[in-house]
Amino acid sequence: MDTSYEMVIGLEVHAELKTETKIFCDCPTTFGAAPNTQCCPVCTGLPGSLPVLNQQVVAYAVKAGLALNCEIAGFSKQDRKNYFYPDLPKAYQISQYDLPLCSRGHLDIQTKSGAKRIGITRIHIEEDAGKLIHDSVQGTLLDCNRCGVPLIEIVSEPDIRSAAEAVAYLQKLRSVLLYTGVSDCKMQEGSLRCDVNLSVRPQGQSALGKRAELKNLNSFSFIQKAINYEFCRQVSLLQAGEPVVQETRRFDEKDGKTHSMRRKENANDYRYFPDPDLVPIRVDETWLRQLAAEIPTLPDARRARYQRDFGLTPSDAEQLTADRQVADYFEQAAQLTAYPKLLCNLVLSQILRLLGDGEDSTIPIAPAHLATLCDLLGQKKIGSSTARQLLPRLWKKDGDPVAIIAGEDLWQLTDPAQLVPYVEQVLSADARSVGDYKRGKSSALQALVGRTMKAPGGRGDPAVIAALLRERLAQ
């Protein structure tokens, strides 16, 4: 990438709210239902139908705003955003324009340079549009099930300067929304989507360039690739003396490129006006305090506590608190072990790997059993290789680690008399490493330690083995 230019990014994130019914009617919001089986005259905008605001939508939006450090408006209204697309049957979307429900918030992320604060301009509620299905035989079909599904749109300030920062912001935002329980954030189902507004400018310049909006990205990987491609595309245009056009573009994951869709609209193109069928939204202090009391301890507060109480690094604490399920599990196990740092290492290196990418997965190992494994590891009764071997087995069939270790005699060997034969065996078989060590190559000792540990099935104490090797090599 050309480092003489800087990218300036603002994100518009749409999160579907986890309500049982839609924003203005009683139609269900169940994902995956047969096409056009969850819609009615209200959510399809038929003449004479009248919307009624779902109070739970406002409650969830306020909780999201509080969790993201926003100011909550005591008075806000809903507006009609007028535009015609095939997936919007009534040709307008009910959204919020000049009086959003939440504003002036922020979210702190961790970068390679340390903590960085990303401003949040606003959070407003709106309804989703339908879904177009392109069929090679029947043409383009419209499924109205998604019409009227409640959304919050979270608009950031243009404070993001790299694809890595954008992904860190989105991951943290997703984590906060999951903690509050307002959305399931299932990106593969479209309940968390992102529009990227990106412009470039020469380093040191304060004026913003013309921006392109990259629409409907629903994968961290695609978001990163789309941002990097679009940055290079705009820089190439500027270097060639060509203008950057303000437009909406889509990212094609097959060719890794962004492609023009249409001219980028401005607010005046939508002809916003207050929706005449909906009364203003009022949030009083009593209800606001009640909603605030329902918000659990959020990732930032947990991260600070883990660093303070368990001595974890900011990076490790950030990873542990990203997923509420993982954080809850870690806390339960941490109360039962004297080695929370070892516990952290096992969770981040092994448990997360076993957990995979499944958003609804649970951890089948009892917290007490993982805590026991950490104690055995910390007390050097077992080695790290034994712990790594046991965890996949416990994942498939949980059980008491002590009983398994005792039954299969997996205790760590710490008696030098037991380890001397293995040391002698390795030294006689690896003359090259012996010679390297005697010529001053210190890394050769680690190679010898590793080979000696493998000999008794990874059960040898590395400290005892290293001492025995130094003693024999000094002779």
Image: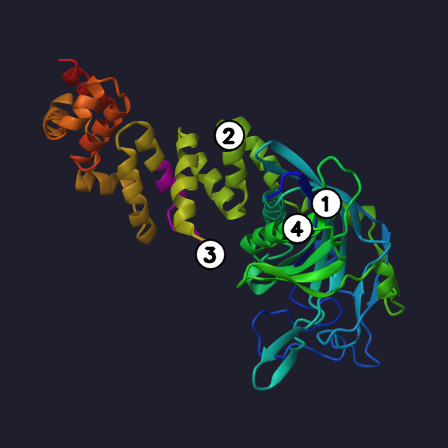
Mark 2: which amino acid?
Answer: Thr
Magenta part of the chain: 359-372
| Residue 216 seen in this snapshot | yes
Give whichever of discs 1 and 2 has the lower sequence position.
1
Mark 1: which amino acid?
Answer: Leu
Mark 4: which amino acid?
Answer: Ser
Mark 1 vs mark 2: give the one in front: 2
Mark pair 4, 1: CA separation:
41 Å
Q: Are marks 4 and 1 in contact (CB under 8 Å)?
A: no
Identify residue for label 4.
Answer: 236
Identify residue for label 2.
Answer: 313
Specify few, some or many for label 4: CA neighbours under 10 Å numbering under 14, 14-19, or 20 or more.
some
In the picture, the quarter occupied by the C terminus is top left
Q: Quadrant of residue 190?
A: bottom right
In the image, is residue 274 part of the stretch drawn in magenta?
A: no
Q: Are marks 3 and 1 in contact (CB under 8 Å)?
A: no
Mark pair 1, 2: CA separation:
27 Å
* Residue 27 or residue 212, whichever sits in front: 212
Q: Are marks 2 and 4 in contact (CB under 8 Å)?
A: no
Please give the label number shown on residue 358: 3
Q: Secondary structure at mark 4?
A: helix
